[in-house]
Image (spheres, rainbow, N blue to C red):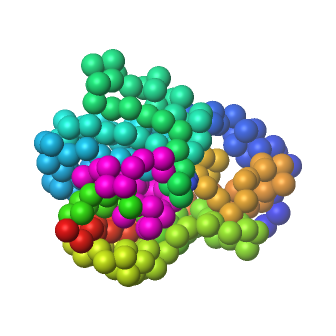
């Protein structure tokens, strides 16, 4: 059904009023996720040893490091976006400055010597298997969580034909690590319900997440309305899904 002009104006104003993402901080979202089979931070903590030197590729604003830095010796976070590194440095608690550092760097050309790290982490960023294995010491571990192609399906689908989401395929990545002589320690997938508790959270997600094309509220008001309509449940919340893969591999020793 076509939108009334009042509803169209309301949606455009609501979408444009949402503040942009700062770093990679999604804490303002009001969401509820069904229990997932793993928690990334817990997995990382369980694999780290106190002596480990860790590289976090695509670190964003470094928001996740605080969750595991106490379980290792040091972490270097790299991100190709200088704005992310600026935010990460601003977020860095002064007492951790000796153990955590951030620098601009590309997953496809990390500027580190061979075998520099005991553990390489990558949550939701670009993976280059050859470069990852190169900077890992023999016997070192790579932990990767990535976003599945069906993630937040109801939010992405209206735009899916307009561009490419450019997600790397978890199975293909795993096979590339195997071809490089790595042992697969863990490979898992989940797809669970993910619920936005209010419309503002839904719109923030739509505005901030990588999409096939960036959303223009004037052009896309009908598509935004379609997402609101198709996800809204009888509880007044907005129901979608979270699709993730976990890959843990060990470089041959
Ligand atoms: C989805 S965010 C994840 C941030 C963080 N790892 C987390 O889980 O909260 C992906 C990050 O990867 C960065 N990125 C994208 N391409 C990259 C590349 N080729 N090399 C390094 N970082 C990259 C982006 O700038 C962004 O900060």
Is residue 122 inside the magenta stretch?
yes
Counting from the top left corner in percent of width and height, residue 18 is at 64, 36
Relative to 7, residue 93 above or below: above
Counting from the top left corner in percent of width and height, residue 108 is at 53, 58
For the question of whether residue 51 can be seen, the reply is yes
Is residue 239 inside the magenta stretch?
no
Front residue (pair 91, 193):
91
Identify the residue at horizontal 47%, vertical 23% (top origin).
90
Quadrant of the image for the C terminus? bottom left
Q: Is residue 218 left or right of residue 231?
A: right
Q: Is residue 215 left or right of residue 99?
A: right
Magenta residues span 110-133
Front residue (pair 156, 120):
120
Q: Is residue 24 left or right of residue 44?
A: right
Relative to 23, residue 185 above or below: below
For the question of whether residue 225 can be seen, the reply is no
Identify the residue at horizontal 31%, vertical 55% (top origin).
115
Identify the residue at horizontal 26%, vertical 37% (top origin).
74
- Total tally of numbered discs in the picture: 0
Front residue (pair 221, 173):
173
Front residue (pair 96, 8):
96
Quadrant of the image for the N terminus? bottom right
Counting from the top left corner in percent of width and height, residue 42 is at 21, 52
Residue at the farthest top position = 94
Counting from the top left corner in percent of width and height, residue 47 is at 18, 55
Residue at the farthest front position = 113
Task: Find residue 34 and report its image quarter.
Answer: bottom left
Task: Find residue 33 and report its image quarter.
Answer: bottom left
């Amino acid at each position: 059904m076509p939108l009334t002009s009042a509803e169209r104006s309301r949606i455009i104003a609501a979408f444009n009023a949402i503040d942009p993402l700062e770093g990679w901080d999604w804490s303002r979202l009001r969401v509820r996720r069904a229990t997932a089979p793993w928690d990334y931070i817990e997995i990382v903590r369980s694999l780290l040893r106190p002596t480990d030197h860790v590289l976090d590729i695509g670190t964003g604003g470094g928001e996740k490091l605080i969750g595991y830095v106490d379980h290792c010796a040091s972490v270097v976070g790299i991100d190709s976006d200088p704005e992310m590194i600026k935010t990460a440095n601003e977020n860095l608690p002064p007492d951790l400055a000796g153990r955590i550092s951030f620098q601009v760097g590309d997953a496809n050309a990390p500027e580190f010597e061979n075998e520099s790290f005991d553990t390489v982490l990558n949550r939701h960023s670009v993976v280059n298997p050859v470069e990852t294995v190169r900077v890992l010491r023999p016997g070192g571990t790579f932990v990767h969580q990535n976003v599945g192609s069906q993630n937040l399906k109801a939010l992405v689908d209206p735009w899916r034909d307009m561009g490419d989401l450019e997600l790397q395929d978890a199975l293909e990545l795993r096979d590339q690590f195997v071809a490089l002589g790595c042992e697969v320690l863990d490979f898992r997938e989940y797809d669970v319900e993910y619920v936005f508790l209010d419309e503002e959270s839904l719109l923030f997600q739509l505005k901030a997440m990588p999409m096939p094309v960036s959303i223009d509220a004037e052009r896309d008001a009908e598509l935004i309305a379609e997402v609101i309509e198709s996800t809204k449940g009888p509880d007044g919340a907005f129901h979608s899904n979270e699709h993730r893969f976990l890959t843990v591999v060990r470089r041959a020793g």
